[in-house]
Image (cartoon, rainbow, N blue to C red):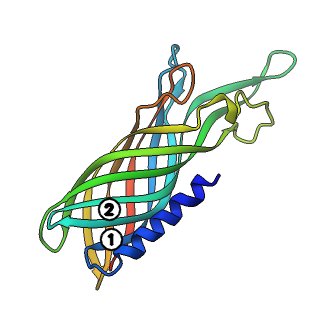
């Protein structure tokens, strides 16, 4: 638990140390994603589901068109099985629901970003992310059923590649709107039977240039 207290403290110290420079930008962001899992599905019964995320960010320009960035955020990943049927004691179908498998992660990305010139700046970025599993849960659309797995059935650490593209739009003085797309491609097995995460989505952020 100590490490997850130290990480945000280190991030805050970095922001404070660089705060005297106008090259530093801090902000918040939110993502809406389509998330899925790769592997461990020989019968093709799983599909993607909607996910989401949010976090704080810090970016520092090391060259006129090149910046490095990091942050700390929350992201829900997972997958689902559609149209699960429930039967009564006589074998009659009484309900049909979707079953969702949710993985809630604390995520730390480290990225390099290339930005264009001009008032509205386009950008592409890429780098690595590390995730820590906070909680695994199953959503059976309100049905009271026994979960198929628990936190202990999965590895705590996830990690992989993160890439993005978007635009930075000035909206008021030093306030900047960040709109773009992002993909987090997991490369680590989070279960013994080969299971990897993936999420693709829309990012919206609000940043302040110090």
Q: Residue tagged by mark 2? A: 179
172 lies above or below 87:
below
Q: Which mark is residue 177?
A: 1
In terms of depth relative to the viewer, which is nearer, 142 or 147?
147
94 lies above or below 103:
above
The residue furthest right is 89
Circles 1 and 2, Cβ within 8 Å, touching? The answer is yes
The residue sitting at 53% across, 26% down in the picture is 46
Quadrant hosting residue 167 = bottom left
13 lies above or below 193:
below
Q: Badge 1 local density, few (<14 within 10 Å), some, or many (20+)?
A: some
Residue 73 is situated, as x and y percent measured from the top left of the image, at: 50, 57
Residue 97 is situated, as x and y percent measured from the top left of the image, at: 67, 33
Badge 1 marks a residue whose secondary structure is strand
171 lies above or below 45:
below
Q: Badge 2 local density, few (<14 within 10 Å), some, or many (20+)?
A: many
The residue sitting at 58% across, 55% down in the picture is 4
The residue sitting at 33% across, 72% down in the picture is 25
Residue 35 is situated, as x and y percent measured from the top left of the image, at: 47, 39
| Mark 1–mark 2 distance (CA, rounded to whole Å) | 6 Å
Look at the image and tell me in which quarter the C terminus lies: bottom left
Badge 2 marks a residue whose secondary structure is strand
Q: Which mark is residue 205?
A: none
The residue sitting at 55% across, 59% down in the picture is 6
């Amino acid at each position: 638990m100590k490490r997850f207290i130290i990480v945000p403290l280190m991030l805050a110290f970095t922001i404070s140390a660089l705060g005297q420079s106008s090259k530093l930008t801090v902000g918040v962001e939110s993502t809406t994603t389509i998330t899925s899992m790769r592997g461990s599905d020989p019968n093709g019964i799983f599909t993607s589901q909607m996910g989401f995320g949010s976090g704080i960010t810090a970016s520092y320009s090391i060259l006129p068109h090149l910046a490095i960035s990091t942050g700390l955020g929350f992201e829900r990943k997972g997958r689902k099985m559609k149209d699960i049927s429930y039967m009564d004691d006589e074998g009659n179908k009484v309900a049909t629901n979707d079953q969702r498998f949710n993985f809630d992660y604390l995520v730390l990305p480290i990225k390099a970003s290339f930005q264009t010139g001009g008032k509205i700046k386009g950008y592409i970025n890429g780098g690595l992310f590390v995730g820590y599993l906070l909680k695994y849960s199953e959503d059976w659309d309100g049905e009271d059923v026994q979960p198929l797995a628990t936190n202990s059935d999965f590895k705590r650490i996830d990690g992989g590649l993160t890439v993005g593209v978007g635009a930075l739009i000035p909206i008021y003085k030093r306030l900047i709107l960040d709109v773009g797309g992002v993909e987090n491609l997991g490369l680590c097995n989070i279960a013994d039977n080969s299971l990897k995460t993936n999420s693709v989505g829309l990012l919206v952020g609000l940043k302040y240039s110090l």
